[in-house]
Amino acid sequence: MLVAMTPIGTGLAVPERLEEDRAYFRIDELVAARGYYETEGYVVLRGIVPAALCDRIRESFEREVRGSPTPILRQQEMRYERNCFDANGFLNNPIFNIQDLETRRFGAFKAAALDALTHAPVARAVSVLLADGPEPEPAKIIQSMFFEGGVGTWPHQDSYYQDSARRIGGGIAGWFALEDVDAGAGRFYVLPGSHRRMPVIRNSGKLDFAFHHASYKRAVLEAAAAHGFEWRAPYLAKGDVLFWNSCTVHGSLSPIVERKASRTSLTAHYLQQSDEMRQFHARVRRQKTRLHNGMSVALLHDQDRWPNRLAREIASRYPEAWATARRVAIRTLLVVADWRRRDRSPVAEPEQPVPAPPRDWPSGSGP
Ligand SMILES: O=C(O)CCC(=O)C(=O)O
Ligand SMILES: [Fe+2]
């Protein structure tokens, strides 16, 4: 075990090898996996993506993306940027929404990544974990990311940024290990039980994204400390996927640079197919979708369309003006959402993120 420090200054034992961690589940144990997910707010499914597919994603990243000068939308600041690399040469500005990449330049990488995110056993697992009745509904992808280097993501609930329009806690995400992830590479962690025991921190008022994002980050730390949650950073081998609920607190540890280890991975956020994305707890953002391997994949800034390429061009040429325009747009959205909330008589939101387990689960069945 490697002993790391959490953002609240407590120790965290990070398993270095498979044998040091829980066994978790395989794809033929979906019923048990679902039970674990309901209690803990996350679950690991081992070996669910074939190793050869993981390799294909990494190879096509090398071939098409690593040396490319084309600006790509990034997760951290939502800006169009060229690739940036850390001291070890690993990409450290993670790619946002792989499905939006331009096919002409990044077609093989995009196809390989989407093949993993829509791989049949993954689709089955997601729809069973998301199901709120005995008949699981097919899932759709609303967001994806690609990581190579560790970035030390702050602890958060995805719900604050995006969730299900149908109900808070109706979203799920997966962290796809494309290699055996070193304990010092900036491991992904979760706070088990936080999806049930900690109220969802709302994106509004004194903790909103537009004006008070720093206060939100502090509020998560304070809530995590006050509840005394355990912090867990599961061992993830190539092909393993960790799924977590949109209300589960999670993040990633800062990498230990001297270990010179990457953590090549994808993440994807899913909803039930007939659901829509709720953004910033403020609005329903309808998205166009395209089918990949029979799964709906939502597009937001599709680079195969010229108006979006023009936007990319402007955004990368005038990054400050772009960032300001985006900030103003989000502020307006959140201010209007707050007004609306105040005007309305309070509507009760279901805060319990995971529905009560249906009595008889169809074993191993899926869409
Ligand atoms: O792996 C990480 O650093 C964070 C990923 C994450 O928070 C997400 O995809 O929602
Ligand atoms: Fe997240």
Image: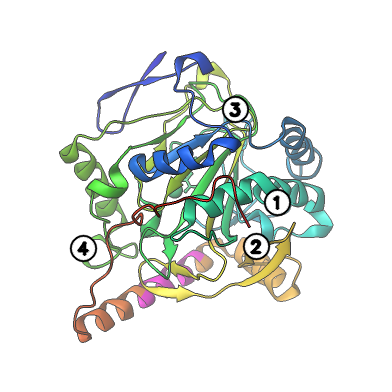
- Label 1 Cα neighbours within 10 Å, binned few <14 / some 14-19 / many ≥20: many
Residue range (magenta): 323-333
Q: Where residue 67 sits: x, y (%)?
A: 76, 41
* Tag 4 residue: 206
Residue at the (57%, 44%) spot, across then down = 93
* Tag 3 residue: 262
Q: CA distance from mark 2 to mark 4?
A: 34 Å
* Tag 2 residue: 297
Q: Quadrant of residue 189?
A: top left
Under mark 3, the amino acid is Ser
Which tag, 2 or 3, sits closer to the chain's start?
Answer: 3
Tell me the tag on residue 114.
1
> Farthest bottom residue?
343
Under mark 4, the amino acid is Lys
Which tag, 1 or 2, sits closer to the chain's start?
Answer: 1
Residue at the (20%, 78%) spot, across then down = 346
- Label 2 Cα neighbours within 10 Å, binned few <14 / some 14-19 / many ≥20: many
**Residues marked 1 and 2 touching at CB (< 8 Å):** yes
Position of 35 relative to 312 (above/below): above
Relative to 72, 305 lies left or right: right
Q: Where residue 10 sits: x, y (%)?
A: 25, 25
Q: Please state which of residues 79 and 334 is positioned toward the viewer in this rendering.
A: 334
Which tag, 1 or 3, sits closer to the chain's start?
Answer: 1
Residue 82 belongs to magenta span = no
- Label 3 Cα neighbours within 10 Å, binned few <14 / some 14-19 / many ≥20: many
